[in-house]
Image (cartoon, rainbow, N blue to C red):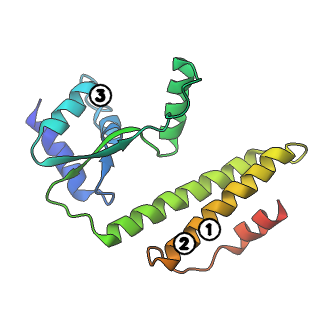
Amino acid sequence: MSTELLDWVYTYLERDEEIVVPIKKMWNEWSMTHRETSLADFTEAVLGDARFEEMPGVSHTEGLEELSPEELEEEAREMEAIGFFSGPRVKLKSREITKEHIARMIQRHNDRLEWNLLQARLALPEEGMEEERSMWVDIMTLARQLRQHLREAGLEPDDTADDTEDAQLSSN
């Protein structure tokens, strides 16, 4: 694989605040200008470079085996559209993962989770759908509890919750 690709990945990982980055996320950016490189080739090249360390991957379609292949593909596209990438992840071997990095990563993911939950709630019709609204309130409550636990553990700043969101949660 080309030195250009591997140097591009190195620079990407050197600058990205995430430190641990999904390979598919990087490939999406790379393939905008280098369409000839498949995800499989990109992944093989990155994982074969000694400067990079493979980190545990995730599958956002795990547990959805009842879906057809087309439905699984659509679910993966929807997850990627909101920033959740399945598959292997990598980091630079030379970049250390610190407590501060983990705290920022958890905070960003929790922020994204809460934002997406709020968008889901706003998409629900006002009439009917009582069960869905009840589920949303339960899930949002769990997300807020997670944020509180993170604060108590010193992994997130102890900012006061946004009054608008609190009012919206309590009115549902």
| Left or right of residue 167, residue 143 in this image | left
Give the CA separation, mark 3 to mark 1: 38 Å
Q: Position of residue 76 (x, y in %)?
A: 49, 32
Q: Residues within 10 Å of mark 3 (few under 14, many from 20)?
A: some
| Left or right of residue 170, residue 83 in this image | left
Q: Residues within 10 Å of mark 2 (few under 14, many from 20)?
A: few
Q: Nearer the viewer, mark 3 or mark 2?
A: 2
Residue at 56% x, 69% y is 147
Q: Are marks 1 and 2 in contact (CB under 8 Å)?
A: yes
Name which quarter of the figure residue 32 lies in: top left
Tell me the residue that label 1 is attached to: 145
**Residue that protrudes farthest toward the right in the picture:** 127
Q: Residues within 10 Å of mark 1 (few under 14, many from 20)?
A: few
Name which quarter of the figure residue 8 lies in: top left
Q: Earlier in the sequence, mark 3 or mark 2?
A: 3
Tell me the residue that label 2 is attached to: 149
Q: Position of residue 144 (x, y in %)?
A: 63, 66
Give the CA separation, mark 1 to mark 2: 6 Å
> Circle 2 — which element?
helix
> How many marks are shown on the rendered structure?
3
Looking at the picture, which amino acid does disc 3 mark?
Answer: Leu
Tell me the residue that label 3 is attached to: 39
**Which quarter of the image is occupied by the N terminus?**
top left
Q: Position of residue 164 (x, y in %)?
A: 73, 70
Looking at the picture, which amino acid does disc 2 mark?
Answer: His
> Circle 1 — which element?
helix
Looking at the picture, which amino acid does disc 1 mark?
Answer: Gln
In front of the other: 93 or 35: 93
> Circle 3 — which element?
helix
Q: Earlier in the sequence, mark 3 or mark 1?
A: 3
